[in-house]
Amino acid sequence: DAGVTQSPTHLIKTRGQHVTLRCSPISGHKSVSWYQQVLGQGPQFIFQYYEKEERGRGNFPDRFSARQFPNYSSELNVNALLLGDSALYLCASSPQKQASYGYTFGSGTRLTVV
Amino acid sequence: SQQGEEDPQALSIQEGENATMNCSYKTSINNLQWYRQNSGRGLVHLILIRSNEREKHSGRLRVTLDTSKKSSSLLITASRAADTASYFCATDATGSARQLTFGSGTQLTVLP
């Protein structure tokens, strides 16, 4: 079985540009969450989507948005990129909307903003 | 912001020794989870302990939880070089069951 897949694995963007990151959850998992991990820190929660609806949002500016598609895959969009957006972006899937059973994480997308 | 802190920030031990990492958190929780991360890649779920549990084992892993002190510990017994990684605790806070809040991590190095 395929795990959580994220694309692309690495990305370099210029300040002010827009970026779209993609995630495919484990088959049968309806919940997708996005986390940002800045170098040297633990991951920070950005969004959770369950059954195509936003179920939770972390303390991130409106430049960050996401959506979930009918096949439960998800996109994270970041507009007007700042240098501080450089980070590893992790996608996690789970079968339920609660964080009660542990998440399966993808390998992440490494975003560098120059 | 981070929910809590892991202690120590870095730990270096010899192969075969035990490694203990501690985690403190701030709010009431439903459960606490430990994850492992190799070289800035994805996180791997290791073990979950619920708020009504005090100790849990999985292979060479032993986790304890003290909700009165808002702290947890992860013990890795008979460590191997392959255990070298960053270890994070993450809390599923009461009333906020949509997200995990991670600590800052412990970097474990196991020397062969």
Image (cartoon, grey):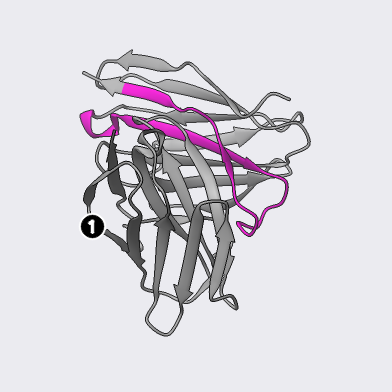
Relative to A13, is A90 above or below? below
Amino acid on which the number 1 mark rests in the picture: Pro
In magenta stretch: residue A104: yes
- From the image, tell me which residue sits under label 1: B8
Chain letter of disc 1 in the image? B
Q: How many neighbours does mark 1 have within 10 angstroms: few (below 14), some (14-19), or many (20 or more)?
A: some
| Drawn side of residue B42 relative to residue B31, left or right | left
Query: Picture quarter containing residue A19?
Result: top left
Picture quarter with the C terminus of chain B: top left
Q: Which residues are magenta?
A: A83-111
Picture quarter with the N terminus of chain B: bottom left
> What residue is shown at x 40% (from left), y 33% (from top)?
B82
| Drawn side of residue A66 relative to residue B103, left or right | right
Residue A19 shows up from this direction: yes
> What residue is shown at x 38% (from left), y 28% (from top)?
A79
Q: Which residue is more in the foreground, A66 or B51? A: B51
> What residue is shown at x 33% (from left), y 50% (from top)?
B17
Q: Which residue is more in the foreground, B99 or B103? A: B103
User: Residue B86: x and y, percent?
Assistant: 34, 42
Query: Picture quarter containing residue A112?
Result: top left
> What residue is shown at x 23% (from left), y 34% (from top)?
A84
Query: Picture quarter containing residue B98?
Result: bottom right
* Residue extending furthest toward the front: B16
* Residue extending furthest toward the bottom: B68
Q: Which residue is more in the foreground, A64 or B30? A: B30
User: Residue A59: x and y, percent?
Assistant: 38, 53
Residue A60 shows up from this direction: no
In magenta stretch: residue B8: no
